[in-house]
Amino acid sequence: MINRGELKRHAKEMLRGKWGLAVGSIIVIFLIQILFNVISSFTKENTIIFIILTLVSMVISSALSVGMFTLSLNYAYDDKQPAFLDIFSGFKVIHKVIGLSLLLSIIIFIGMILLIVPGIVFSFMFSQAYYVLADDNSKSIIQCLKESAAMMKGYKFQYFVLSLSFLGWMILGTIPLGIGLLWVMPYMNVTVASFYLKVKKNYYKSSIE
């Protein structure tokens, strides 16, 4: 059983004195996404340029997400130092980011078509795949999926409850024009990264035994 309170305390401890970097990274990613939305708004829909811009925006968004996972992991690790450039680390393995995003979308979509419930189960099963990639860029897409599925055995419901525990914070964060989310998001991200480190440790421990 993973202690949620322990994960959250660890996240707060690791963020202490480093909130500026965490909040600043969220702002930069948000501004980049806004920039693409503004550029897209000046192009007509259903045109080649609009489609290309949309695809590029999706790829960049996925790469930045992996970068945010990397940053969050570097916060969560006791022996690593987070850095601003971490948010761009996803571009180093952009081909894997694209492949993983496509595969996950297809798997979850198929699950949703079947009965919705399988889609939800798949989303939790492979929820750690991006963290696996962010943690070790040398791993293949299939490896990331396999390890995520193995790590999450017996932890899906705990992950669901952990995610749900931030709902109140997310709602509160949106009240003052969403400004509060600049602090809620890093707190949540580092907590979830800490969860990944726990299930990873348990996974490797059980593999050895």
Image (spheres, rainbow, N blue to C red):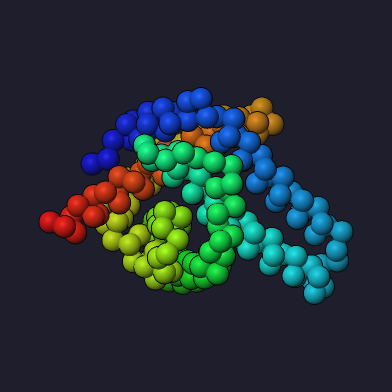
Left or right, 4 with respect to 82, comes to left
Where is residue 67? Give x, y as percent.
Answer: 54, 51
Residue that extends furthest to the top in the rendered view of this protein: 17
The answer to whether residue 112 shows anywhere in this view is no
Q: In this orientation, which residue lies closer to the viewer: 154 or 201? A: 201
Q: Residue at x 55, y 29 (%)?
A: 19
Q: Quadrant of the N terminus?
A: top left
Where is residue 56? Give x, y as percent.
Answer: 69, 65
| Count of residue discs | 0
Left or right, 19 with respect to 35, comes to left
Question: Which quadrant would residue 192 be assigned to in this image?
Answer: top left
Q: Quadrant of the C terminus?
A: bottom left
Left or right, 31 with respect to 188, comes to right
Q: Residue at x 68, y 67 (%)?
A: 55
The answer to whether residue 110 shows anywhere in this view is yes
Compared to residue 65, the image places residue 143 above or below, namely below
Where is residue 113? Give x, y as percent.
Answer: 47, 70
Q: Residue at x 59, y 42 (%)?
A: 84
Question: Which quadrant would residue 14 be assigned to in this image?
Answer: top left
Q: Residue at x 19, y 52 (%)?
A: 205
Q: In this orientation, which residue lies closer to the viewer: 195 or 164? A: 195
Residue that extends furthest to the bottom in the rendered view of this protein: 48
Compared to residue 83, the image places residue 128 above or below, namely below
